[in-house]
Image (spheres, rainbow, N blue to C red):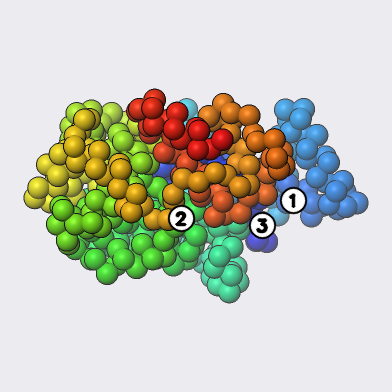
Amino acid sequence: MPLRKSASPKGPVFAFFADPVMEHTLATEQATYNAQKLADSGAYSSADALNAALQKSVRDGRSVPDQAPETPLEAAQLLIYKTPHTKAPDERRRLAEEALALSADCADGHRILAEYEQEPDQKRRRLADAIAAGRRIFEASGLDADPGERWRYIEIRPMLRAMATLGMHLRAQGDLDDAVTVFSDMIDINPKDNQGVRFVLAPLLLALGDIKGFQKLDAAFGEEPSAEWAYSRALLAFREAGPASRQALKELRLGLSRNREIPRFLGGVRSIPDQLPIAFIPGGDDEAVLYVDRAGALWRDTPGALDWLSETTVAGSTASDEIEDDDDAYDESLAFRPPRYGFPTLWRWVSLRPPAEGPTQGRDSKLSRKERQLENELLIRIRGMKSLDRLAAMVDRLR
């Protein structure tokens, strides 16, 4: 089966999917599959002609026409692409069974059928079959030499989806050691971790007391701008150095700047909904809910941690104000500063006109990774501000 690259999204992304299985990406994969098959058909004289046709389809509200499969596995995967649109559970199961009848290497087929297994051990065996099927395709793909680009090849995603499902199943069953092994293997296969399993793995490592494992993961994603990461670092610093340590307060301040709702959910002031979100916007309630689901037990099981969190973050707390005003607690790279590059998204957020000097139009697609991270940080902090005076001061500085 030929390997097909999936296009990478452009521009800053502020909504992040929270389900590491990422089955919602099947529609995108199908579009990529059809586009690649169309390119391979020779129906267009050049890449520009093909792109023009694809763009016209998008403008007209039409999807890329389904292309005929060339192998049994391709035919099986096309059946899997229909499963997100099914409403009846029996129909989803039927499609998975038909896919496996076409090809035993259809990892997604095994993964879906695992949903219907009642016994945990049988579910685990079915997911192991899914991973083995996906690994056969992965090992035949020749992608070992290019780990940074693996997620862009859609043929290895069924294996990664199956691994994520198994890891979540093991976590739910309390088999934390095996869950850590599965999630760690996923990051070894896909170092960029497009599925976000690091956010599930980090609390598991801390729960098992694997500080070196957490530090290794932290080093691999050292510029991770999420609130989850900052709160987990704060908890680790609280455990290792105590509540008054500079490192613990620094990380807590960073966490508060990114999401102020997490302490409220952790402390029980706000209740976790029955159904977890599948996506979130940084700084919002959904991000807080997901973090508490993943790491809430860690905070509850750490003596004094919730009291420390409450005392230093409750509205009007003197300790909270001290954290807010301690400039040295921030990493210099995260400090507020006038945006040299225009930051169009940021200007739109605070409803300001961009400065007259310097070009800002079209800058969204030209920002470097570091510039985007800084912009994300600024947006997250502004969204978390409760004081109008602080926001006004920030706007003045941005001007």
First-in-chain label (1 vs 2):
1
Q: Looking at the picture, does residue 28 appear above or below residue 170?
A: above
**Residue type of the residue flagged with mark 1:** Lys
**Residue type of the residue flagged with mark 2:** Ser
Determine which quarter of the picture holds residue 233.
Answer: bottom left
Quadrant housing the C terminus: top right
First-in-chain label (2 vs 3):
3
Where is residue 218 drawn, in percent x and y?
36, 62
Disc marking residue 280: none
Quadrant housing the N terminus: bottom right
Q: Residues within 10 Å of mark 1 (few under 14, many from 20)?
A: some
Q: Is residue 241 left or right of residue 344?
A: left
Q: Is residue 295 left or right of residue 138?
A: left
Where is residue 199 drawn, in percent x and y?
36, 51
Residue at the left extreme, as displayed: 303
Indicate the secondary structure of the residue bearing disc 1.
helix
Where is residue 179 drawn, in percent x and y?
29, 58
Indicate the secondary structure of the residue bearing disc 2.
helix
Disc marking residue 333: 2
Disc marking residue 37: 1
From the image, state whether disc 3 or disc 1 is nearer to you. 3
Residue 225 makes an appearance in the image: yes
Residue 169 makes an appearance in the image: no
Indicate the secondary structure of the residue bearing disc 3.
loop
Where is residue 16 drawn, in percent x and y?
47, 41
C-alpha distance separating marks 2 and 3: 37 Å
- Circle 3 is placed at which residue position? 4
Q: How many marks?
A: 3
Determine which quarter of the picture holds residue 205.
Answer: bottom left
Nearest the viewer among 344 and 356 is: 356
Nearest the viewer among 366 and 154 is: 366
C-alpha distance separating marks 3 and 1: 9 Å
